[in-house]
């Protein structure tokens, strides 16, 4: 990268972070408050549309919303409590994908993960589109044509913010979150408090409304209208799974931090949802064209405040627009993390598990942002359409997670304390989530919900295809390992034809030719590279230097223990290569590095190697597939070519050894 390009990159994304910094994990992790902002904003922002959807679904029987609100609060606490149990059982994170994979089956986990990915892409799109709607609801109508462009700019801005890093993206959004919480808490307290004396009358009118609905619709009709309103407000619960997916970014001890975050999310969302529904009833708000139901409510609350009232409504609505933009952050935090976990399990290209020099899953962020931009264009930023597509998939994950936990507790009967409580809680969660999933799917299916299920099915089919390819490649790679026993049993391998007696303790020869071999573990691929080098240059190289770079991906970057384990594993692999070569009379040594970019790390090691061995030639093995296609190029990194190009520019000879599978 040129100096100018590097300066531009640092201007927008910041300087590279060092893995050698001992405080890096502490610096990047989130305490409960910041986790509440980054992961809880999705759930809290759903109060901008979830309670309104449930309230409006009741038609003229608005007083029944009190029952729907109580049911919604109960559901929030049941789902939150069940996910707290998931946090304890899976403290390394992964949420619904890991739960379903470990407790049900890998393929069921894959379906759960694909549902989450589509849901998070929709979360970003819907949140930003809703924010744009709220923003333009109090701007002159003549500017409405700029709404889609504004929404797309919002997505691009969030992509850039997240590429800078997790903590940076969250802390920048804290003021917006705080303003939203303060304004809405004040509006709810004032709106409800000013009508405390009316609460007995409200209770009486609710009972009368229930009797009237019963007489008009019958008991079954009454139950159906309540259940429909309850399920139409299902968007309220989205985001409650975010903490279990994002545990890896929380401050140690992660389980305690995760549970605190879940408590903050559950309490704040419950109070907001119930407070808004109660305020809707108290002020008798009705749907108004061109305005959100919350906007109608806030104007009614501040109707007699004069100029301060207008200012309060304006600030509150701006905070709603802004919090919806912030809510998209959940999709950017958890979507790439779910994608990385699935990539580590080979359901998606492994490059999605790699980290940038800002220690974020850059490719995952770009993919989620790109998918959101496509959805924004296809939908035209229509919130009504996006809401139809939304909230189905998250209940697929909710249901599978609860089913997995129920299976866990059934298997733990009599062995784990508290299994009865856990089984009851997750069993109730399973019933609620399964009911909402079936109801929402039935209600939304012919309105466009089928498209969400079709896209999720297509993503799952792609994941199956990718996993099949990786499994076939793994089988072929294992065939390469069959070379290891033969070479290990040959004591004359690496010796020149004229060397009858091999030195017992080979010494380095700085003036001699040196072969520098890039390896990735002690395996058949590395040995085939060594064998190919020996066949072409038998006996010419007096020194061997084995270079291995430990790639820190999303699976490793979880804590100091994982980093130390990676370093120990690399050292052990290199020692086996060194012992193999020295046992055959050739001087060898191992050189290693830990980083997120193999090319940069190899380039950083090269000057010292060339200083000690000026006549060094670099070698790297590259797999050659029976049928080279676009898919094989996409699913495999071909990083050896990138290393060759980098060293070529520096005048260092690099030979690529083709290894056919």
Image: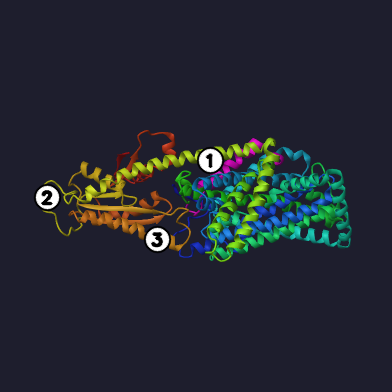
Q: Secondary structure at mark 1?
A: helix
- Give, as a single range, the part of the protein colored magenta: 356-385
Tell me which label, 3 or 2, sits earlier in the chain: 2
Question: Residue at horizontal 44%, vertical 59%?
Answer: 19
Q: Nearer the viewer, residue 242 or 7?
A: 242
**Which residue corresponds to mark 2?**
499
Q: Secondary structure at mark 3?
A: helix
Q: Is residue 532 magenta?
A: no
Residue 248 in the image: x percent, y percent? Answer: 52, 58
Which quadrant of the structure image shows residue 604? bottom left
**Which residue corresponds to mark 1?**
460
Q: Residues within 10 Å of mark 3 (few under 14, many from 20)?
A: few
Q: Image height check: is 166 above or below 364?
A: below
Q: Residues within 10 Å of mark 1 (few under 14, many from 20)?
A: many
Tag nearer the camera, 2 or 1: 1
| Magenta: main secondary structure | helix
Q: Is residue 364 magenta?
A: yes
User: In this orientation, does residue 11 appear?
Assistant: no
**Which residue corresponds to mark 3?**
565
């Amino acid at each position: 990268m040129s100096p100018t390009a590097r300066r531009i990159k640092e201007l927008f994304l910041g300087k590279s972070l060092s893995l050698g910094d001992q405080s890096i994990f502490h610096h990047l992790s989130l305490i409960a408050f910041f986790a509440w902002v980054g992961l809880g904003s999705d759930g809290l922002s759903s109060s901008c549309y979830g309670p309104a959807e449930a309230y409006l679904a009741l038609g003229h029987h608005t007083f029944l919303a009190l029952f729907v609100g109580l049911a919604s609060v109960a559901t929030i606490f049941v789902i939150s409590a069940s996910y707290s149990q998931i946090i304890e059982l899976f403290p390394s994170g992964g949420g619904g994908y890991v739960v379903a994979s470990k407790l049900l089956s890998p393929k069921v986990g894959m379906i759960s993960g694909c549902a989450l990915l589509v849901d998070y892409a929709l979360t970003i799109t819907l949140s930003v589109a809703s924010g744009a709607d709220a923003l333009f609801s109090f701007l002159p109508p003549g500017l409405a044509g700029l709404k889609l462009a504004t929404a797309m700019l919002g997505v691009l801005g969030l992509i850039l913010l997240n590429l800078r890093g997790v903590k940076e993206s969250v802390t920048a959004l804290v003021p917006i979150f705080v303003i939203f919480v303060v304004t809405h808490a004040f509006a709810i307290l004032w709106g409800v408090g000013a009508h405390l004396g009316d609460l007995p009358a409200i209770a009486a009118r609710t009972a009368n409304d229930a009797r009237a609905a019963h007489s008009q619709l019958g008991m079954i009709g009454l139950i159906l209208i309540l259940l429909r309103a309850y399920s139409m407000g299902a968007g309220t619960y989205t985001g409650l799974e975010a903490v279990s997916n994002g545990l890896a970014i929380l401050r140690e001890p992660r389980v305690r931090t995760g549970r605190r975050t879940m408590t903050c999310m559950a309490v704040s969302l419950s109070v907001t949802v119930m407070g808004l529904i109660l305020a809707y009833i108290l002020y008798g708000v009705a749907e108004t064209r061109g305005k959100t139901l919350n906007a109608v409510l806030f104007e009614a609350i501040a109707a007699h405040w004069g100029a301060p009232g207008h200012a309060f409504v304006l600030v509150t609505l701006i905070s709603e627009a802004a919090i919806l933009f912030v809510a998209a952050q959940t999709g950017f935090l958890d979507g790439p993390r779910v994608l990385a976990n699935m990539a580590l399990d080979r359901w998606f290209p492994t490059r999605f598990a790699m980290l940038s020099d800002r220690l974020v899953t850059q490719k995952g962020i770009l993919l989620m942002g790109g998918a959101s931009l496509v959805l924004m264009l296809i939908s035209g930023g229509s919130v009504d359409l996006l809401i139809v597509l939304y909230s189905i998939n998250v209940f697929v994950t909710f249901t599978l997670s609860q089913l997995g936990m129920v299976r866990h507790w059934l298997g733990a009967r009599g062995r784990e304390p508290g299994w009865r409580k856990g089984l009851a809680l997750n069993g109730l969660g399973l019933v609620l989530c399964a009911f909402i999933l079936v109801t929402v799917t039935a209600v939304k299916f012919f309105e466009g919900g089928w498209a969400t299920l079709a896209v999720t099915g297509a993503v799952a089919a792609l994941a199956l295809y990718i996993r099949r390819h990786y499994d076939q490649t793994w089988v072929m790679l294992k065939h390469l390992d069959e070379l290891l026993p033969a070479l290990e049993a040959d004591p004359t391998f690496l010796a020149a034809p004229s060397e009858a007696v091999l030195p017992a303790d080979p010494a380095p020869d700085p003036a001699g030719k040196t072969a520098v071999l890039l390896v990735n573990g002690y395996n058949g691929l590395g040995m085939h590279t060594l064998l190919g080098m020996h066949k072409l240059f038998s006996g010419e190289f007096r020194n061997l230097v084995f270079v291995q770079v430990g790639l820190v991906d999303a699976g490793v970057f979880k804590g100091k223990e994982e980093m130390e384990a990676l370093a120990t594993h690399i050292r052990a692999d290199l020692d086996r290569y060194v012992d193999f070569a020295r046992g055959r009379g050739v001087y060898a040594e191992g050189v290693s590095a830990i980083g997120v970019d193999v090319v940069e790390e190899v380039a950083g090691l090269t000057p010292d190697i060339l200083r000690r061995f000026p006549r060094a030639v670099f070698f790297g093995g590259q797999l050659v597939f029976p049928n080279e296609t676009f898919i094989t190029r996409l699913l495999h990194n071909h990083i050896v070519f990138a290393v060759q190009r980098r060293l070529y520019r520096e005048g260092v000879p690099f030979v690529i050894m083709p290894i056919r599978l």
